[in-house]
Amino acid sequence: MTNFTEGQWINWIDQLSEQDYLVIDNFISDELFQQLRTYFMEVLQEDDFSKAGIGALHLHTINKAIRGDQVFWLDKPRDEPVIPAFYQIIDELKDMLNRYCFLSISDYEFHMAHYPVGTFYKRHLDQFKERSNRLITLILYLNEDWQPRDGGELTIYTEQGAKTIAPLGKRMVIFKSDVLEHEVLVTNAGRNSITGWYLRQPVGLGFL
Ligand code: OGA
Ligand code: NI
């Protein structure tokens, strides 16, 4: 569970519905932050990340001119001890969104993402044309001591103009997947996050 009150959540959810995005600093405890970082580094050292693609399923292609990150999908069996603690928070937030935003989130999918030095992700929307069940995007940054010279900012394109958000550790960015275009600027340091999506219907039922 998080330390946030229901009033705090409602406040944030209001912001999300009005501005299409929301930034929450210090979203997780130091302890969970360090545990997630440790797990992330283990997977990275074992070289278990794979290059991220574009498009869903059979249309999946890898194009380094569009995105250069590497991803590792977090499985539902959740056998890694730290992942249930993370998913507990994700469940809590899902319940709030369903209750106060009248959304019908029924599932989610998350991966860890690593952007090596020199990589980026060009401006895009997170909803694939051929599979539109991504409702809300969530990005939790796992970078310690991120400096302005490290670049790698997330730029979001809102009705009020472009906004640049540094990928600071423990910062959570949440936005509407179908409306908010965004991009990741070139990073000058290895850039790590857990990124995921609340879904309208269970993964795998996309063809029904
Ligand atoms: C994505 C994405 C942004 C970020 O994975 O689709 O846009 O800041 N990530 O990592
Ligand atoms: Ni994106």
Image (tube, helix red, strand yellow):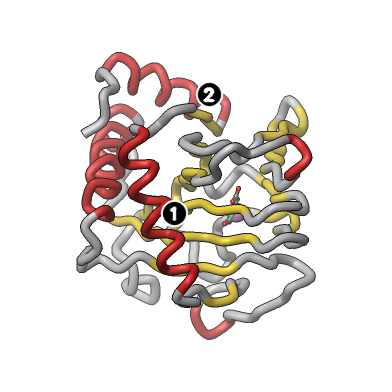
Question: Left or right: where does residue 93 sit relative to residue 48?
Answer: left
The residue under the point 53% across, 77% down is 50
- Residue linked to disc 1: 196
Image check: 68 left or right of 132? right
x and y percentages locating residue 153 in the rendered image: 70, 42
Residue in the image at 53% along x and 85% along y: 58
Name the outermost residue toward the top. Answer: 7
Mark 1 Cα-neighbour bin, 10 Å: few <14, some 14–19, many ≥20: many
- Secondary structure of the residue carrying tag 2 is helix
Rendering coords of residue 195 (x, y %):
47, 53
Q: Nearer the viewer, residue 131 or 83?
A: 83
Q: Relative to 38, does residue 14 appear above or below in the rendering? A: above
Residue closer to the observer: 44 or 88: 44
Q: Is residue 66 above or below residue 47?
A: above
Observer-nearest residue: 57 or 165?
Answer: 165
Helix, strand or loop for disc 1: strand
Q: Position of residue 176 (x, y in %)?
A: 52, 42
> Residue drawn 68% across and 39% down?
156
Picture quarter with the C terminus: bottom left
Dot 1 amino acid type:
Gly
Q: Amino acid at mark 2?
A: Glu
Q: Position of residue 123 (x, y in %)?
A: 74, 53
90 versus 14 height, above or below: below
The local crowd at label 2, few if under 14, some if 14 to 19, many if 20 or more residues have their Cα within 10 Å, is few
| Residue under the point 47% across and 28% down | 24
Nearer to me, 163 or 42: 42
The residues tagged by marks 2 and 1 sit, at their Cα atoms, a distance apart of 21 Å
Between disc 2 and disc 1, the foreground one is 1
- Residue that carries the numbered disc 2 in the rendered image: 18
Locate the N terminus and report the quarter of the image it occupies: top left
Q: Is residue 183 left or right of residue 109?
A: right
The answer to whether 120 appears left or right of 35 in the picture is: right
